[in-house]
Amino acid sequence: MEFKPSQVIKALLIGAGVLLVILMLTFPSPKAPSLDSKKISSIAQDVMAQAQLITKHRTLKEDLNVQRALFYFSLGELASEKGNVNEAIESYKTALKYDPKSSFLHARLGEEYLKRSEYEIALTHLKKAVEFDPNALQAHLLLGGIYAATKEYQKSEGHYKKAIALDPENEKSYLFLATLYSDQKKYDLGIETLQSILKKEPQSFLAYYYLGQIYSDQGKVSKAISQYKKALKIHPGFYSAAVALGLYYETTDQVDKAIDLYMAALERGERNSRLLKRAVQLLLAKKDYTRALKLLEDLKLQDPDDLNNRLRVGLIYFEMKEYEKAKVEFEELQKKNPDSDRILFYLSAVYEKTGEAEKALQLLKRIPEKSTFYLDSVAHHIYLLKESGKYEEALALLIPSLKKYPKHVPFYDLQASIFEKQEKYDKAIEVIRQALKQFPKEERLVYYLGALYDKQGDTERALSVMQDILKTNPKNPDALNYVGYTYVTQKQKLDEAEALIKKALALKPGEGYVEDSLGWLYYVQGKYKKAKDILEKAVQMRSDEAVILDHLADTYLKLGETEKAYLTYQKAMNAKPDRKTTDAIKQKLEKLSENEVIKKRFPAKNK
């Protein structure tokens, strides 16, 4: 029988009732996923559109078939909206049984199969969609996309042009066609297509963005930059244009401009994860931990299960020396990932800083030999034993490890450093010499050899080693600093010393040892106020370094700040200096203890 308008109304009323029932059944509690009113309205409109398509194209034998088709179509729309692709497909397939020639249903099935990357099945349904309704706009766009992906450009172009003919105001169709031309390097046609959008809609930021992409592909950088800027002027938070322009700034060493651009887009409310990650990466490279941390907290909210974001937060706290906060992050991560070698390693480093060496050792022991962190974990285990004065235990772990992994350079460093701690400098030097036979170009080992000669008291030989390093690598900051500092301690070539130290500081900014060298240079030159400012900065960077504290205390003494000098010498003693430095500081403290100001200020310490 012919399907009359009154029956359509009846079917729609039934469909609306079904939709309400579905919504009630689908979302039984506040904890379940929810759809807002706009989404529900959109789904209802799709249901009505489907009913109109049915009445437009044919009559149906059974009123019941319409009701069933709409029912399963409604289920499919709800499942699709919630991201349940498999459920959506089954519902649409069932709806199709009751309405097998529905172009709309075939198009929706094709779209869902594309989400599952089942392109052949999707293609079949989309072809049927345009067969049953040659004016099915969405089906033409999807077919154009499939053919573009399979490089069947002529077919793709035909579908995009058909879509434009069906709806000349639909911006997407033009954008897809322009991209298709660009993929074929038909840049003039792509530009022409995008400009036709701008004639209709001069505020189309997408058209400007894709023009920028085409100019970029052509190597016309200035034109591309101009288009990206136009896109951002219209839509300041448009992340794709921000990233494209930002990457240009990054590759042309305009990192600050890139950061400003990303931050501006983020401040306007754009929370795209790619944009956030670019900004975080650049801020970390500049050691701007405060801003990087704020953005990472946003990323954590976007994806709480992203392990890398949580790791970065913990590592930033570690770099900022906020070890308790780092500990909280890594302990939470470790609870969720108890066997992660990376988390075990990082958490052990945090425990070391919080004075929980035993906890650190227990974690390091759990890292398996197959792990990429294994050798570093063994090295750190040995280091912790050395620092706690367990030299024999450290060597007992080191010797077999060195035999098993003779190519692992840090093990030689460690062995020499254990002998250095015991003031067995000859043994330490011999270890490094033997290592250099295997690794003659290992600059770090050569530098350590020079430092050991210095500890042994052979300054001339140490200086010669450092100067040899600078002949092959004039930008080695540690060697530059050593030579400069040695000249300062010898009170010779002070102008050259200053140039060397400042060069080292430029190569290694924020390094406490280099700042100390510069401060001590000013001390030797009698510029005590200047020395004080620099040495206080050095102590902030290396608060546990006895020699730097000793230098600062000497400076306070010269400036008449006796109490500060006394307290700083005490801190230097607590930093466990070597025997030579210890003896020197003790003499200074003994001399100061006779000072009347110190006697009155610290009576208990001078009894």
Image: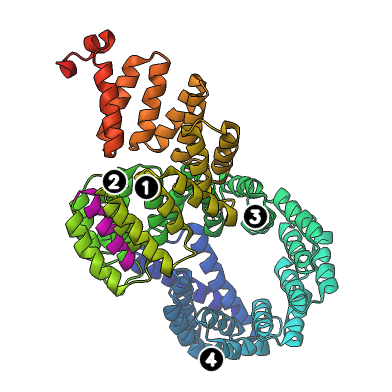
**Disc on res. 61:** 4
Q: Are marks 1 and 2 in contact (CB under 8 Å)?
A: yes
The residue labelled by disc 3 is 250
Color style of the picture: rainbow
**Disc on res. 515:** none
* Residue 204 position within the rendered picture, expressed as x and y whole percent measured from the top left: 74, 58
The residue labelled by disc 2 is 353
Q: How far apart are marks 1 and 4 (CA)?
A: 73 Å
Q: How far apart are marks 1 and 2 (CA)?
A: 9 Å
SS class, disc 1:
helix
**Image depth: mark 1 or mark 2 in front:** 2
Q: At label 4, which amino acid type do we have? A: Lys
SS class, disc 3:
helix
**Disc on res. 318:** 1
**Image depth: mark 3 or mark 2 in front:** 2
Q: How far apart are marks 4 and 3 (CA)?
A: 66 Å
Q: Does 269 sit above or below residue 165? A: above
* Residue 421 position within the rendered picture, expressed as x and y whole percent measured from the top left: 27, 48
Position of the C terminus by quadrant: top left
Q: At label 3, which amino acid type do we have? A: Glu
Q: What stretch is highlighted in magenta?
A: 374-389
Q: Residue at image x 57%, y 38%?
A: 502
Residue 525 appears left or right of 304: right
Instruction: Choose the circle earlier in sequence order: 3 or 2.
Output: 3
